[in-house]
Image: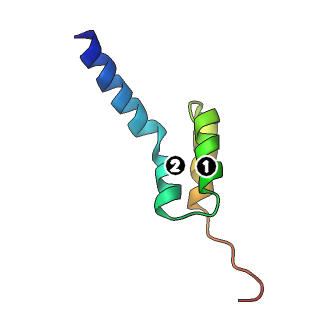
Amino acid sequence: MDAALTAVVAVIGAAFHLPPSLIAFNRSSGDRWLVLVVNGAFGATLVGWVLDLCLPLREPRVSAAA
């Protein structure tokens, strides 16, 4: 029973912890590796997670030559 509960808690925790990284990789964000590192380091805190979520959701930069 303890192993099953641990597995359920781990899956729920990952479901709340990983969205910034998944969004960054699905959108092919230029900062996707930065998002992954920041999510791993600070994603457990609410402030770190929200800031990490802002990175992949911002508009891509347009170069001046375009």
Taking the view exactly as shown, the residue that stands out farthest to the bottom is 66
The residue lying at 53 percent from left, 57 percent from top is 24
Work out whether 60 lies above or below 8.
below
The circle drawn on residue 21 is: 2
Q: Is residue 4 left or right of residue 10?
A: left
- Which type of secondary structure does the marked residue at label 1 adopt? helix
Q: Residues within 10 Å of mark 2 (few under 14, many from 20)?
A: many
**What type is the residue that disc 2 sits on?**
Ser
The residue lying at 46 percent from left, 47 percent from top is 19
Work out whether 56 lies above or below 41.
below
Taking the view exactly as shown, the residue that stands out farthest to the top is 2
Q: Position of residue 15 (x, y in %)?
A: 39, 38
**Disc 1 designates what residue?**
35
Q: Is residue 1 left or right of residue 16?
A: left
Label 2, label 1: how many angstroms apart (C-alpha)? 6 Å
The residue lying at 50 percent from left, 64 percent from top is 27
- Which type of secondary structure does the marked residue at label 2 adopt? helix
